Image (cartoon, rainbow, N blue to C red):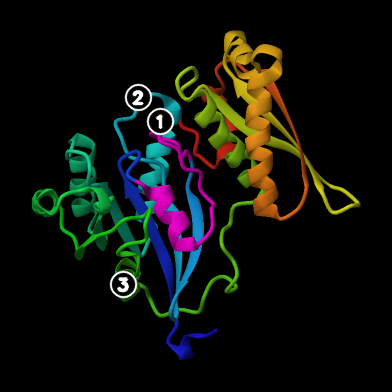
Amino acid sequence: MNIQQNTKCGFVALIGAPNAGKSTLLNSLVGSKIAIVTHKVQTTRARMVGVAIHGDNQMVFVDTPGIFTAKKRLERAMVSAAWEGAKDADVVVFLVDATLRIDDATRSIAEGLKESGKKAILALNKIDIVKRETLLAKTQELNELGDFEETLMISAKTGNGLDDLQDKIAEFLPLSPWLYPEDHLTDITERMLAAEITREKFYLRFHEELPYAATIETERWKELKDGSVRIEQVIYVERDSQKKIVIGKGGQGLKVIGKMAREELEELLDRKVHLFIFVKVRKGWGDDKERYQNMGLEWSD
């Protein structure tokens, strides 16, 4: 495709407070699961890229970590990745969970976008479960805080309002050839996607016992002659006591994670998956420079 055909292409950053629904929105827009979704905040750690076609427009969406008051090094790297995603984008979609009160983090993002001068669209999410009068009040307050090109009401879960959102995004994209083939969905490698799927299952299984205490890496990926694939992963935790919880009595904890991850991977990859998961203790992995590189985050002293 070329510019003479009036095609547009550009980068769209999805930013917001933790758990605003950015990953759910990304998956809905792309039409495939490329970002993990859990009820836990701060699930997304690095920038995720998803590609969607809307008419003659190719939209390269960047799902960023949630923006919040960061204290630890890992948290600072996540927030930095979010703002970098916004800085590099042609247009920003500021996603707000309409079911929650407008807190300091949300106010800070609105004000930060205003100061940056970036073209931004305000999208109030989860409108399927919010009363109209509540939506109107939140819309007014947010527009007083920020400077938005448009305010839209959407539901990332049901798809309500997503066509309107993409229509508005398209207005701000530059004329450009498409950057990716039409069937390209994401820049995430299969190895990384596999690790993310297992991390999602880890959060779902251990969300109370081990909040954010682990990182998962795909260490080996071997294509087998029968068309199946052997995947070996390591769950890194910080203490021996955490390792015991993950493995569980008789190995049941690890078996549950492995079964859920394998079933989803087989569906995504459309082939048989032999998944082997090991648990290792790596004290202070949150301060390990190599782990940041593996997650696509910048290391800072």
Q: Mark 1 touching mark 3, by CB under 8 A?
A: no
Compared across the picture, whether 84 is left or right of 46 comes to: left
* Along the line of sight, the residue nearer the viewer: 250 or 98: 250
Q: Position of residue 191 (x, y in %)?
A: 68, 45
Is tag 2's residue or tag 3's residue first in the polypeptide sequence? Answer: 2
Compared across the picture, whether 157 is left or right of 100 comes to: right
Q: Amino acid at mark 3?
A: Phe
Task: Give the residue at mark 2.
Answer: 71
The structure residue drawn at horizontal position 29% and vertical position 51%, both measured from the top left corner, is 95
Task: Give the residue at mark 3.
Answer: 172
The region drawn magenta spans 21-45
Q: Is residue 133 above or below residue 168?
A: above
Q: Quadrant of residue 156?
A: bottom left
Is tag 1's residue or tag 3's residue first in the polypeptide sequence? Answer: 1
* Along the line of sight, the residue nearer the viewer: 292 or 243: 243
Task: Give the residue at mark 1.
Answer: 75
The structure residue drawn at horizontal position 80% and vertical position 46%, both measured from the top left corner, is 229
Q: Position of residue 91 (x, y in %)?
A: 33, 63
Compared across the picture, whether 250 is left or right of 213 comes to: right
Quarter occupied by the N terminus: bottom right
Q: Position of residue 255 (x, y in %)?
A: 68, 26
> What's the CA distance linking mark 1 and mark 3?
31 Å
